[in-house]
Amino acid sequence: MAKAGRFDRQAWDWPVYQPLLETALAHGLPVVAANLSRAEARRVVSGGIAALGDPALAAAVALADTPARRAALETDILEGHCGHRFPAPTLAGMVAAQQARDALMARIAARAALDAGRRGAVLITGSGHARKDRGVPAYLPPGLRAISLAFVETAGPDAGAAVPAPGAETIYDYVWPTAAAPRTDPCLAFRKPAAR
């Protein structure tokens, strides 16, 4: 199944997602890719959203775009890259790619939810894309009800079931505390001195 769907095993931990996909297939539910490909994302970074040749997607991004949302995405990208400073055109392109991803995922999720005979759809994505204020929900058509759930790692034994997100209603509807996953520091690569 992973091979047929060209599942990116480097970016995603297949054993975690395998039961979700098996459940969908066992119940005859469609599984649809919803993100930009890496090649498409690179085109957006270097040439803007217009490089995709999808005027409707560009219009959706323009409609939802604000200076505050762009600034927040810039901060997210810089924090996600351990504070590494990108040249301004590169950072702007990375923001555009993030916006294009969210708008495309919203389009595909809405189409899946509204297809004849369906009662909804589930989009499995990262917590940044699940944000109501600047992620996929911000690009959904008006009137399409969405519930945003984020899994949030905790340092303690607070892992449990999803709970309403008090004080963060504009970000997620629910948060699900989970135990922190063991991993090496992702910022090590940014702190290593360049090879000569």
Image: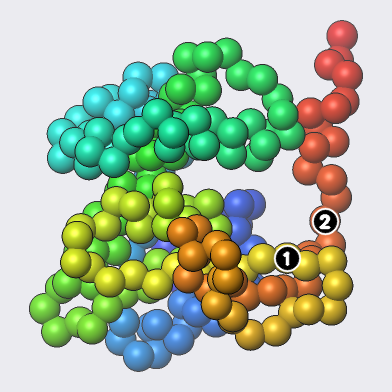
Outermost residue on the front side: it is 167
Q: Position of residue 122 (x, y in %)?
A: 38, 73
Q: Residues within 10 Å of mark 1 (few under 14, many from 20)?
A: some
Task: Determine which quarter of the picture holds residue 68.
Answer: top left
Residue type at mark 2?
Arg
* Quarter of the rendering occupied by the C terminus: top right
Q: Name the residue beneath numbered marker 1.
A: 153
Q: Could you give the CA–CA distance between mark 1 and mark 2, rounded to whole angstroms?
A: 12 Å
Outermost residue on the bottom side: it is 27
User: Which of 54 and 83 lies nearest the eye of the viewer?
Assistant: 83
Q: Position of residue 22 (x, y in %)?
A: 47, 83
The answer to whether 57 is drawn above or below residue 24 in the figure is: above
Q: Does residue 32 appear in this view?
A: yes
Q: Position of residue 154 (x, y in %)?
A: 78, 67
In the image: residue 68, left or right of residue 61: right
Front tag of 1 and 2:
1
Residue type at mark 1?
Glu
Q: Position of residue 168 (x, y in %)?
A: 55, 62
Task: Determine which quarter of the picture holds residue 166.
Answer: bottom right
In the image: residue 53, left or right of residue 44: left
The answer to whether 66 is drawn above or below residue 3 in the figure is: above
In the image: residue 31, left or right of residue 142: right
Which residue is drawn at the image coordinates 85% and 36% (left, top)? 188
Which residue is drawn at the image coordinates 19% and 66% (left, top)? 143
Q: Secondary structure at mark 2?
A: loop
Instruction: Pick whichever of labels 1 and 2 is earlier in the sequence.
Output: 1
Q: Name the residue beneath numbered marker 2.
A: 183
